[in-house]
Image (cartoon, rainbow, N blue to C red):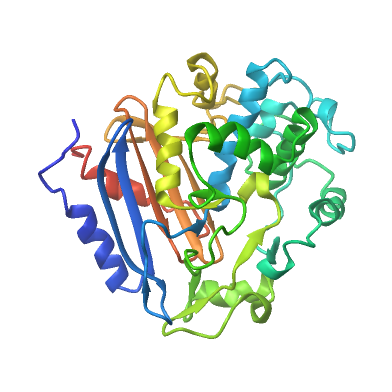
Amino acid sequence: MIKKAYAMFEPDITLTKQLTGNKAPSVQYMIFDEYDVIHKFQSGFADIKNQKKVSWKSTFNAFSVTKTFTALAILQLVEKGVLDLDNSAKNHIAEFPYPEEITIRQLLTHSAGIPNPNPLAWIHLDAEHESFDRDAFFSPIIKKYSKTKSPPNQKFAYSNLGYFLLGQIIENTSGQTYEDYIRQHILKPLNIGPQELNFEIYDKEMQAKGYQKRYSLMNAVLGLFLDKKKYMSGPEGRWKPFKNYYVNGTSYGGLIGSADGFRKYIQALLDPDNPLITAQFKKHLFTENFTGSGKATGMCLSWFKGTLNDRDYYAHTGGGGGYYDEIRIYPDLGIGSVVMYNRSGMTDERILDTLDCYYLNCK
C-alpha cells in the first residue's frame, strides 16, 4: 500500500538535506502511478553562478538510462519479425570483430563478454556536435578492443560498447538513424516533445549546468580521463561546471531530458495497453538473464532487477561528468519513480531505495 498522506514530505526533507549539505546543486524527484503523479519535489540551482533555480522544464544529461530505450527499440523490431533475440549479432553488422556465437540477447543482457573501456572521455562539446563523426570515432576503439573478455553468457559484464553495437543493429535493420528511430517509434507515440526528451539540447536556457564538486577525489581523477580545461569552466563556489556536451555513443548514453519526460515513458511501460509494445513482448524486458551455468545475473534486457521491502523492481541509473539520475518501475505496485541531479555520479547509488521507501511502508 502506498502512503499518500503520512510522511508525505519525508523525501523532501531528505533531498533538502542533500542540497544544504552540498551533495548536489539541484534535484528533481517524482513518484507516480500509471495515470497520476503521487508526489514530486524539486529544489536547488540549475545555474549556480546566475542563481537560476531548477524548474520542471530543466533538462539533464541522462547517460545510461538511454539503454532502456535501446532495448525497447530492439524488442519492437523483434515483434515486427525483423530481428530474433537469439540470432547472431554478426548477421546485422558487417564489421563485427567478435565471435559469431554472440547473440542480440547477450548484448542486451551484458553477457556477451564485450570489453568496457572507460567512457568518460567519449564526449564532445556542443560546438563540435555538427561536425562530430560517430563512426570515425568508434571504428578504432572497436578495433582496439576486438577481443572478448569471456565466452558468451558465461557471466554478467557491463559494456557500453555492446550497446553501441545494438544501436548499429537498430540502424541497419530499420533503415533509420538510431536517434530518428527512437523519436518516431518511442517518443512520438507518447507525445513526448523534444523539449522533454531528445538527443540534443533543445533549449540551452533550460539545460541545467552539470557540476563536479571542486574539492573531491573525483575532480582530481577526472583530469586523468579528459581535458578539464576544454570541458569545464571556472569554479562557481564549491563546484566546477561542465560546458554543454554530448555523449559520443547515443545508443548507450545520449538522451537529454527532464524528469517529466521520463515519467511519461515509465508510465507507458506501466500501461498494459501502451502503444509501444504488446504485453507479450514487454515481458522480455523484465525477464532476468541466467548464465549458461544457471547463475542469476540480476540483469534483464537493459533493466537491473532488485527488491525493496519485498517488492521487485526494475531500474537503471545514468551518470557521468556533471549529472546523475535513476529510473525505476515496481510492476506489482503499478508505480514508477525518477530522480535527477546536476552533479557527477559514476556508480549505482540506489538513492531511490531511500526515497521510495517512504511510500512503500518499508519495515
Position of residue 78 relative to residue 207, above or below, is above
Where residue 191 sits: x, y (%)? 48, 37
Q: Nearer the viewer, residue 110 or 261?
A: 261
Residue 115 drawn at (x, y percent): 73, 46
Residue shown at 26% from the left, 35% from the top: 309
- Image quadrant where one finds the N terminus: top left
- Quadrant location, the C terminus: top left
Residue found 21% across the figure and 39% down from its top: 362
Q: x, y (%) of residue 264?
A: 42, 38
Q: Is residue 164 visible?
A: yes
Q: Outermost residue, left direction?
A: 6
Residue 99 image point, x, y percent: 84, 31
Decide if residue 333 is on the left or right side of residue 165. left
The residue sitting at 36% across, 27% down in the picture is 331
Q: Nearer the viewer, residue 271 or 106?
A: 271
The reply, left or right, for residue 60 in relation to residue 74 is: left
99 in relation to 255, above or below: above
Image mark count: 0
Q: Tell me the residue at 71%/27% (across/down).
A: 104
Residue in the foreground of this view, choosing between 220 and 77: 77
The reply to whether residue 159 is in sight is no
